[in-house]
Image (spheres, helix red, strand yellow):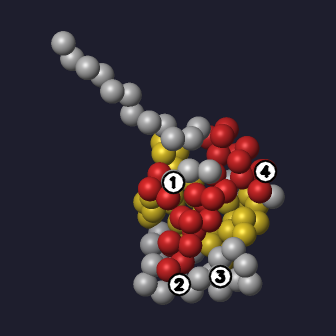
C-alpha cells in the first residue's frame, strides 16, 4: 500500500530590504512587495539572516520554515515560506503594521 504524504503549504514572498536602518521593522506593502528595514549590514549574509529572523517573529513560525530562494546579494529577495497560506501571511503582516 502506498502512503501519500501531503507537502506542506509553500508560498513565495518578494521582499525589498533596506539595510543599516535604525531598527528592524516591517514597513508595509508596495506593489505586491513587502518592504522591510533591518539594522544589519549587507555583509557576509548578515542582512539575509536578519530578514529571516524578522519574518519568523512576525509570522510566528520557525526560522527553518523560511528560506532565501533568490536575491542573496540584492535588496530585492524572494523568500519561501513553508506552513502558511497567502491569506495567513498577509493577516500576520498586517497585524505588525
Residue 95, label in figure: 4
Query: For the N terminus, which image quadrant?
Result: top left
Q: Which residue is mark 3?
A: 39
Image coordinates for residue 27, horizontal then vertical, percent: 76, 66
Instruction: Tell me the distance, in whole angstroms, between the alpha carbons under discs 2 and 1.
Output: 23 Å
Q: Is residue 16 left or right of residue 47?
A: right
Tag 1 and tag 4, C-beta contact below 8 Å:
no
Q: Which residue is mark 2?
A: 42
Instruction: Tell me the distance, in whole angstroms, between the alpha carbons under discs 1 and 4.
Output: 18 Å
Q: Residue at x 72, y 69 (%)?
A: 25
Instruction: Tell me the distance, in whole angstroms, between the alpha carbons under discs 1 and 3.
Output: 21 Å
Image coordinates for residue 11, horizontal then vertical, percent: 52, 45
Mark nearer the N terminus (2 vs 1): 2
Mark nearer the N terminus (2 vs 4): 2
Image coordinates for residue 63, horizontal then vertical, percent: 50, 58
Q: Return the residue found at the far top.
A: 1
Amino acid at each position: 500500500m502506498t502512503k501519500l504524504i501531503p507537502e506542506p503549504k509553500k508560498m513565495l514572498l518578494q521582499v525589498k530590504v533596506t539595510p543599516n536602518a535604525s531598527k528592524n521593522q516591517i514597513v508595509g506593502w508596495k506593489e505586491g512587495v513587502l518592504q522591510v528595514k533591518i539594522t544589519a549590514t549587507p555583509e557576509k549574509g548578515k542582512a539575509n539572516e536578519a530578514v529571516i529572523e524578522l519574518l519568523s517573529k512576525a509570522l510566528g513560525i520557525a526560522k527553518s520554515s523560511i528560506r532565501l530562494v533568490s536575491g542573496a546579494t540584492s535588496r530585492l529577495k524572494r523568500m519561501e515560506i513553508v506552513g502558511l497560506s497567502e491569506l495567513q501571511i498577509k493577516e500576520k503582516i498586517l497585524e505588525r503594521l
